[in-house]
Image (spheres, grey):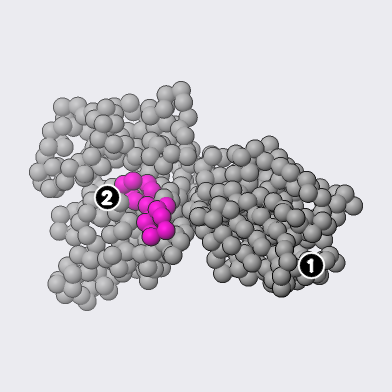
């Protein structure tokens, strides 16, 4: 008897419907799995056999053939254990043929028959809803994640035995209540109010958050660069539900979603170590998986000790900074991952860290300092809008008991500036967050938008002309200065870019001789 159970494969960040066909025949007892399975799927044979026996059910002593269709799609991971087990039970008449009509089934089996966590439940549930399936059976630990998808009956499965009782009408498994995203809290890890001094750096980070601009902080060890970077997500605008689902989908596929957190409401903050490979940063593998830049999507990618990263590693992020996505090509195919992140980098001015410090002398030679700073290429520096120095904090500021301005107040100004940008780019229509190229903030503007929204008056044009000559700005740097000026004007609530806005933007360009 032939049984069919519908399941799902994850390709990149999207799901593909997989039809699990199970048939029994004459011959020596064995389970044959075909349909481009990987090692984890092949090992389902032992898990399924022992799970059925330990659940108190009968495993047939027959030749069982399992086909995972379509055969051209690679199947990986243990998520096919449960559908294969149900297919075996249906094929041997232990369950009704129509018990899984209109149903999706995913889950890994333990040897005792309990159903374990799997990755990628959110895109699987989204695919089930898209393909008009009425219900989905998922591991009970993943049910709240699947319940984020509306109009889908999510049934948590604790074990194979309980699911068997449910499908044979001996008892009923209760559906998972819908997960309400609004009830999931947003936590602030590092608040601006706790950072002593560095007001000009906080101002730079506020501008960065308001317009989505990249930042490079340069200063001696212990000045607070890492602390300042960790405070940036707290002043970024709150993620919309669409953005939160977009981020959660990536973390679900990467199997980094906390068990008690079905939806990520905090802006991601990723800080990879400088020993990371380029595949770990942008994504890769035999069958590509998301890298750090995709895990930082809609959030912050922090690269501490920037010159210590390998030159190849740094160069591969140049294109994702511009395109807001990364395309990875392999012999098996090409996959695209979103990578709309804000780059925040930090570095010391020299190997010892004290070049230019007023108190501690630098022990590096001039050639060593130059060689150290030249590790970062000009094209990468050109893509960073804000260059800010982070000096050491003096004793009076550190010992002051007064708190600074809280992140919530800064975030309110950032939200107002972002509202102006949304109204400018999408008058009357909200942006569609499933499009990585969608304009959502000033840093996303293309030359056509810069020409339209970044007009300069006569005084500002004269200032810009002098800056182009004296600071040797490239065409890219010219456009980035205009975008930054537009953001500063938005924070001030001004409809036009004034000379003071342009002057402040020019102050954030790297100083001559600094690199």
The image shows residue 463 at horizontal and vertical percentages of 15, 36
Q: Is residue 314 above or below residue 54?
A: above
Q: Residue at x 41, y 42 (%)?
A: 436
Indicate which disc residue 59 carries: 1
The image shows residue 96 at horizontal and vertical percentages of 82, 50
Residue 83 visible to the viewer = yes
Q: Is residue 453 magenta?
A: no
Say which quadrant the N terminus sits in. Answer: bottom right
Q: Nearer the viewer, residue 254 or 462?
A: 254
Q: Is residue 189 left or right of residue 262?
A: left
The image shows residue 401 at horizontal and vertical percentages of 49, 57
Q: Is residue 96 left or right of residue 390?
A: right
> What's the CA distance linking mark 2 and mark 1?
61 Å
Q: Is residue 215 left or right of residue 515?
A: right
Q: Nearer the viewer, residue 271 or 12?
A: 12
Q: Quadrant location of residue 442?
A: top left
Which of disc 1 and disc 2 is earlier in sequence? 1
* Disc 2: which residue: 383
Q: Residue at x 38, y 60 (%)?
A: 331
Q: Which residues are magenta?
A: 320-335
Q: Is residue 55 above or below residue 489?
A: below
Q: Residue at x 38, y 59 (%)?
A: 330
């Amino acid at each position: 008897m032939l049984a069919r159970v519908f399941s799902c494969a994850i390709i990149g960040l999207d799901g593909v419907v997989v039809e699990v066909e199970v048939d029994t025949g004459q011959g020596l007892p064995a389970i044959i799995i075909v349909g481009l399975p990987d090692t984890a799927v092949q090992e389902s044979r032992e898990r399924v056999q022992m799970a059925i026996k330990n659940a108190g059910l009968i495993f047939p002593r027959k030749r069982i053939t399992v086909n995972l269709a379509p055969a051209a799609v690679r199947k990986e991971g243990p998520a096919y254990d449960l559908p294969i087990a149900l297919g075996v039970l249906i094929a041997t008449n232990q369950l009704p043929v129509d018990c899984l009509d209109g149903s999706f089934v995913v889950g890994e089996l333990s040897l005792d028959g309990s159903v374990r966590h799997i990755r990628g439940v959110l895109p699987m549930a989204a695919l089930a809803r898209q393909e008009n399936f009425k219900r989905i059976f998922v591991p009970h630990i993943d049910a709240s994640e699947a319940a984020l998808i509306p109009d889908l009956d999510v049934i948590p499965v604790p074990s194979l035995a309980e699911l068997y009782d449910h499908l044979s009408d001996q008892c009923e498994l209760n559906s998972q209540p819908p997960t309400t995203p609004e009830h999931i809290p947003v936590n602030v890890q590092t608040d601006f109010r706790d950072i002593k001094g560095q007001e000009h750096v906080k101002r730079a980070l506020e501008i960065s958050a308001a317009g989505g601009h990249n930042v490079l902080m340069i200063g001696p060890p212990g000045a607070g660069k890492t602390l300042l970077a960790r405070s940036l997500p707290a002043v970024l605008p709150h993620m919309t539900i669409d953005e939160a689902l977009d981020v959660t989908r990536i973390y679900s596929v990467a199997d980094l979603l906390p068990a008690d957190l079905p939806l990520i409401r905090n802006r991601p903050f990723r800080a990879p170590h400088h020993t990371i490979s380029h595949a770990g940063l942008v994504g890769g593998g035999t069958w590509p998986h998301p890298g750090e830049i995709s895990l930082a999507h809609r959030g912050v990618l922090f690269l501490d000790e920037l010159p210590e990263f390998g030159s190849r590693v740094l160069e591969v992020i140049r294109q994702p900074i511009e395109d807001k996505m990364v395309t990875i090509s392999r012999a098996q195919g090409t996959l695209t991952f979103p990578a709309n992140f804000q780059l925040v980098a930090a570095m010391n001015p020299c190997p010892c860290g004290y070049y230019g410090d007023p108190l501690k002398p630098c022990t590096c030679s001039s050639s060593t300092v130059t060689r150290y700073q030249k590790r970062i290429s000009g094209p990468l520096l050109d893509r960073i809008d804000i260059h800010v120095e982070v000096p050491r904090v003096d004793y009076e500021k550190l010992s002051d008991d007064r708190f600074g301005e809280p992140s919530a107040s800064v975030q309110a100004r950032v939200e107002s500036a972002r509202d102006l940008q949304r109204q400018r780019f999408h008058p009357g229509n909200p942006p569609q967050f499933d499009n990585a190229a969608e304009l959502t903030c000033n840093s996303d503007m293309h030359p056509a938008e810069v020409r339209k929204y970044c007009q300069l008056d006569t005084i500002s044009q004269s200032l810009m002309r002098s800056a182009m000559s004296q600071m040797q700005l490239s065409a890219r740097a010219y456009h980035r200065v205009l975008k930054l000026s537009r953001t500063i004007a938005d924070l001030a609530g001004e409809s036009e870019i004034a000379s003071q806005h342009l002057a402040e933007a020019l102050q954030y360009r790297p100083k001559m001789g600094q690199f």
